Amino acid sequence: MSTILIIVIAVVVLIVLAVVLLGGKRKRDERDQEKRVEAREHQDQAQLRSTRADKEEAAAKEQHARAERERAEAEERSQTARRERAAAEEHSGQAQELDPDR
């Protein structure tokens, strides 16, 4: 084999090796970019869902507060009704004591 042929083969091998390595790097870069895009999409979804969760939590707290106010109002009305019933029974008792027909 001549020296020139060996040099040509070595140069061709180096060129093929360089093309393969550059092609592999380019594919890795493309894959990395795709993963970045996918990660960003997931991050956007996470942010959207977090915002929805915050809104739902706020609505639940408001509903709970409203229910608590209504419970307090119902308790207050119940106490008023008990006082009125006690007053009515007292008046009824006084009426029976005062009624000469009884």
Image (spheres, rainbow, N blue to C red):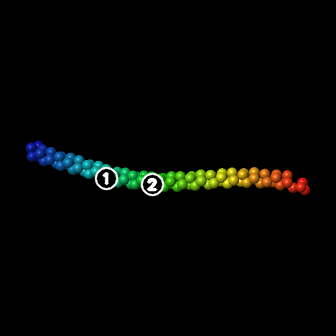
Q: Residue at the spot x=75%, y=51% of the render?
A: 86
Q: Is residue 38 visible?
A: no
- Quick check: 64 left or right of 37? right
Q: Which residue is mark 1?
A: 33
Marks 1 and 2, how far apart at CA:
27 Å
Q: Residue at the spot x=48%, y=53% of the render?
A: 53
Circle 1 crowding by C-alpha within 10 Å: few under 14, some 14–19, many from 20: few
Q: Residue at the spot x=37%, y=51% of the render?
A: 39
Q: Quadrant of the N terminus?
A: top left
Q: Which residue is mark 2?
A: 51
Residue 74 is situated, as x and y percent measured from the top left of the image, at 65, 53
- Quick check: 58 left or right of 3? right
Q: Secondary structure at mark 1?
A: helix
Residue 5 is situated, as x and y percent measured from the top left of the image, at 11, 46
- Quick check: 55 left or right of 76? left
Q: Residue at the spot x=66%, y=51% of the render?
A: 75
Amino acid on which disc 2 is placed: Thr
Please report contact status of discs 1 and 2: CB closer than 8 Å, yes or no: no
